[in-house]
Amino acid sequence: MRMSLLCAFSVSLAVSYVASSMESEQPIQLPEAEFAGEMSIEEAIGKRRSVREYSRDSLTLDDVSQLSWAAQGITSKRGYRSAPSAGGLYPLELYIVAGEVDGLSPGVYRYRQTEHDLILLASGDRRSQLATAALGQSWVRRAPAVLVIASVYERTTRKYGQRGRRYAHMEAGHAAQNIYLQATARGLGTVMVGAFDDSEVQRALRLPADHEPLGLMPVGHKR
């Protein structure tokens, strides 16, 4: 009986310690997004290309901030985002897999739109694991960071049924194009990667089971 109580007490302490550690993880506030740039939208569209080769230069926290905002940032006091969403239900979640970002430790982060900040989900450089999940595509490993677009389908299917899955895919395309154009405007390169093992990506990044990956976008300076 005494041993059982001791074990229960030890487990309780362990759970409390893990919970307090998670709660003590401070959000990383991103720099304020810029609303005007030097390149016009027409020029960005004209120069946009898929880029798979990157220099060894790191990204900055400003880069991560601007790309995150372009993908899913809040653009209205009413909570509207940078990419259109069927019914305003916003099924997408954006993750940043950081490897070489100045001011950001290697790890997996979730972007929170309303606060424009990042929450650390898993420490350590996960780019190699992610590249393995992406069938060995080396540019996923070599890019300083990878943006991961995931969907929580239930947010749209509960209103639109199975048609809601198609709407989520449309929205992912809108967000990806925003990332492409924002990267181009900042002199960066990216590519949309769709070939990967879904469950392996979820496992490598420790994503919730209902956050299903739709696209990986490695980002870096063009070579």
Image (tube, rainbow, N blue to C red):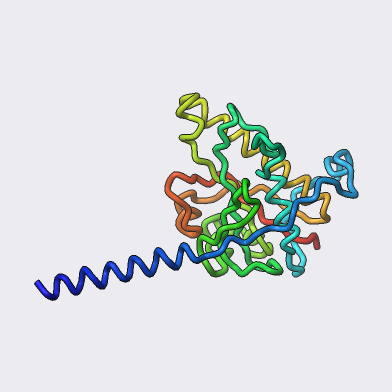
Q: Tell me if residue 174 can be seen.
A: no
Q: Quadrant of the C terminus?
A: bottom right
Q: Quadrant of residue 72?
A: top right
Q: Residue at x 50, y 40 (%)?
A: 152
Identify the residue at horizontal 46%, vertical 35% (top origin).
Answer: 154
Q: Toward the viewer: 118 or 203?
A: 118
Q: Position of residue 134 (x, y in %)?
A: 56, 55
Relative to 63, 163 lies left or right? left
Is residue 128 toward the left or the right of residue 75 in the image? Answer: left
Relative image position of residue 140 (x, y in whole percent)? 63, 59
Instruction: Give me the residue at 73% from left, 67% from top.
Output: 58
Q: Is residue 219 visible?
A: yes
The foreground one among 166 and 24 is 24
Residue 199 image position (x, y, % from top left): 45, 51
Where is residue 148? Give x, y as percent: 59, 51
Residue at the image point whose x is 53% and y is 47% from the top:
213
Answer with left or right where residue 15 lies relative to residue 204: left
Residue that extends furthest to the front in the rendered view of this protein: 77
| Image quadrant where one finds the N terminus | bottom left
Q: How many marks?
A: 0
Please tell me which residue lies in front, 209 or 116: 116
